[in-house]
Image (cartoon, rainbow, N blue to C red):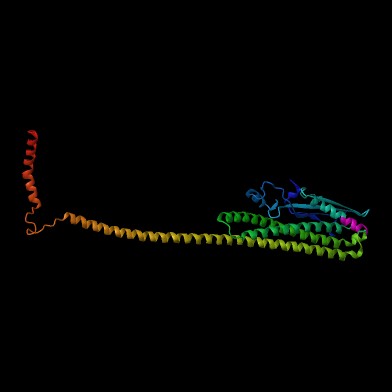
Amino acid sequence: MSLVNFREIWPCGFPSHTSVYERKLDFWLFLPIRVGVECHDRNGSHSSSSGKVKQMNPFTFLHLTRSRVDVKLSKIGLYFVFDQKSANTRALVFDFQDGQSTRLVEEPITRFKEALDNHNEHGLGRDPFYIQRALLISALRWWSSVIFSVRYQLDAYKKSLLSEGLSDEEFFRLRTDTNKSLHCMAAHLHRYKTELTFLSNLFNNVRRYNREFHDELVEHGVRGQDTLHEILSEIKRIRSQLFTVSMFSDELQQDIDTMLALAEAEQSRHIADQTHQLTMEMTKILKATQDETKMSRQVAMQSQKLSENMMKDSVAMKTVIRPTQRSYPYHLDTCQIAILTAFFLPGTSFAVGRENIYF
């Protein structure tokens, strides 16, 4: 397993006056850092659903789509050795950063060289504080860059969530992607808080080391007698930068909670708009149904009237009105017509038949 992915808390070892140690001025430490490197993902896997599921683990990278940056976990180790016989110092630096960015990898070494070159002229190049200072300043600069990159990404998400004129499909896709990204960022920010807390404790150890062993370092000619106040003031100034970074990190966490609530509110508003539109459509449908029902009722009433008229006509056709004898003296009723037909029709048929035979 790579040391950069080692998931235990980063250790440190500083001497104390209560411990019995031959080389009591030696110390070692690991600095937890987060660095932003350019994203080289060409197929979009970092922005995909599977990529975001992977980013829920705060020990992996965090992809920031707006700035095309991947925030990666890293660490820097330092082992300081002081030889009391020769009064010489050696510093071993272990850089576990991603090799994709040469500038980031070489920065700690460059800082150490600058610190040694600037203080060797005054005979203070062996002072461990200047190595500690160079390393802490680099770490805080990386942390500040990462925090502001996350801030920039959050502003982009906020602007997207407040955009108007999105279709239902676009809004659903935007909300889904944004929620996943915000939860990934929330998981990483929780881990950032732990790492920044450890970094704050490391500042306490550095301050205690320089204050408690100031006399020993002066005795071996490593630093001047009157430099303690300046060193402690410098540590306090650098720690104030750490406090600012931690404060911004906490604000980002609060902003993420606010944006998640905003996403929920926007979803509720979007659902309310859809419900209102659906209600209006249903109202129109109900009104049309009522109009159709009214027309159907009118048609039914007309059909009923028509049926009644047809019934009256049928009854009138079946009804035979008998006129008076005075008006029609030769009128024969139905019974008389039937009797005459039965009496004369057979003879008529027979006469016609005989005429046809003798023709």
Front residue of this view, candidates 205 and 127: 127
Q: For residue 116: magenta?
A: yes
Q: In this view, does 208 lie to the left or right of 300?
A: right
The location of residue 101, given as percent across then percent down, is: 78, 50
- Taking the spot 41% from the left edge, 60% from the top edge, the residue there is 288
Residue at point 73% right, 59% down?
Answer: 148
Which percent across, then down, holds residue 52? 65, 51
Name the residue rendered at 39%, 61% in the picture. Answer: 291
**Image location (x, y in percent) of residue 138:** 80, 57
Q: In which quarter of the image is residue 205?
A: bottom right
Question: Residue 152: within the magenta?
Answer: no
123 left or right, relative to 324? right
Q: Against 61, is 301 above or below?
A: below
Say if residue 21 shows up in the picture: no
Q: Give the residue at the far top of this rendering.
A: 358
Asked whether residue 270 is in view, the answer is yes
Using the image as rendered, state which of residue 156 and residue 30 is in the foreground: 156
Position in image of residue 244 (x %, y %): 75, 63
Prevalent SS, magenta region: helix
